[in-house]
Image: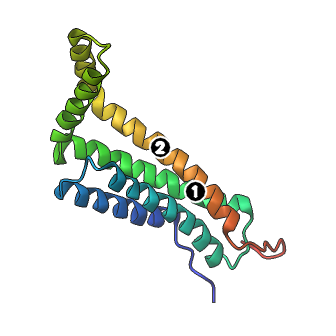
Amino acid sequence: MENKITPAWTKALIISLICIVYGLILYFTGQMQNKALGWVQFIFLFGGIIWSCINYAKQMNGNVSFGNAFGHGFKVTAGIAAILAVYTFIAFKFIYPEMIDLSMDEARKNMEAKGNVSEDQIRQGIEIGRKFFILFAVAGVLIVTALIGAVAALIGAGVAKKNPNPFEQQ
């Protein structure tokens, strides 16, 4: 009996949905500005990608190389990044657009607290930030997810049980 390999896109969808649901829970409980709870999403992401590499090697009965396991983990990462980028766009555009205002208010407070920025510079910075907020958010999600995913895939591929058999067809 041949083992069925769970596709990378399925794992990406599962991990993305966990992160999205957790983010929505934070939003609806009023905890979006809680930085400590925000880090939990990164733990889900990191752990999920490591799990995906280990699970892939297990489903392949250990007949994988480090590169195979890493490649699978990075495919999962790419899927997660794409899903979360689309979600980020939709979320800030339609689900909770008021988060842009909250973020701009926070940025204004931080600039005013520094004291070395004029009111005109603050106003210009806020206008630019508001205009490009969604673009920066989507780009940030793509970059951060790719970086976290690459590290997690490296770790996952490193800890996955491997005993590649060159004589067995993959």
Label 1 sits on residue: 152
**Mark 2 / mark 1, whichever is N-terminal:** 2
| Up-down relation of residue 145 to residue 120 (above or below) | below
- Horizontally, residue 94 falls left or right of residue 19, namely left
| Up-down relation of residue 93 to residue 6 (above or below) | above
Amino acid under disc 1? Ala
Amino acid under disc 2? Val
Q: Secondary structure at mark 2?
A: helix
Residue 127 drawn at (x, y percent): 22, 20
Tell me if mark 1 has few (under 14), some (14-19) or many (20+) residues whose alpha carbon lies within 10 angstroms of its own. many
- Horizontally, residue 74 falls left or right of residue 140, namely right
Q: Quadrant of residue 66?
A: bottom right
Label 2 sits on residue: 144
Q: Quadrant of residue 88?
A: top left
Q: Quadrant of residue 158?
A: bottom right
Residue 48 numbered tag = none
Q: Quadrant of the N terminus?
A: bottom right
